[in-house]
Image (cartoon, helix red, strand yellow):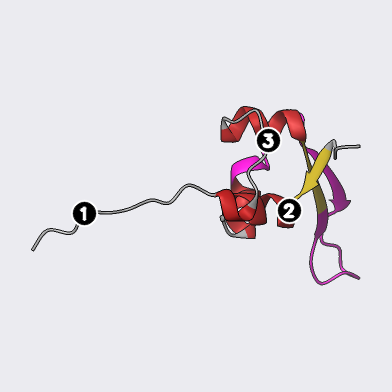
Amino acid sequence: MEKQAYTVAEVATMTGFSRQTVTRIFERERGVLIVGHSKTEKDKRSYRSIRIPRAVYERVIGTSNTMEPDARPITTFAMSR
């Protein structure tokens, strides 16, 4: 059975992006599940757990199949002298 939702860490591994970048990309996307609480006097910081449904991942990343970490496309840059 395939996963229906991914964690931020899983998407970061699949794409090669940092967890912060994945959070910024997906935190305002429609369909992403965010559970947590805001900072209060008792708590020093806020907490949230983000789950990214597979359909949202595919829509945003633009692929119908998930990329394995070793299957990431290699980007090359031409350097001018």
User: Residue 19 appears at what percent x and percent y?
Assistant: 64, 58
Q: Earlier in the sequence, mark 3 or mark 2?
A: 2
Residues 48 and 37: in front is 48
Name the main secondary structure of what is drawn in magenta: loop
Disc 1: CA contacts within 10 A as few (<14), some (14-19) or many (>=20): few
Q: What kind of residue is marked 2?
A: Glu
Q: Which mark is residue 10?
A: 2
The question of residue 29 being in magenta is answered with yes
Tell me the SS state at disc 1. Answer: loop
Furthest toward the left, the residue is: 81
Residue 54, quarter of the rendered image: top right
Q: Marks 2/1: CA distance?
A: 31 Å
Q: Residue at x 60, y 48 (%)?
A: 24
User: Residue 36 appears at what percent x and percent y?
Assistant: 87, 52
On screen, residue 42 versus residue 76, left or right, reads right
Q: Earlier in the sequence, mark 3 or mark 1?
A: 3
Q: Marks 3/1: CA distance?
A: 30 Å
Q: Which mark is residue 57?
A: 3
Residue bearing the label numbered 1: 78
Q: Which segment did they paint magenta? A: 25-48
Numbered disc in front, either 2 or 1: 1
Q: What kind of residue is marked 1?
A: Ala
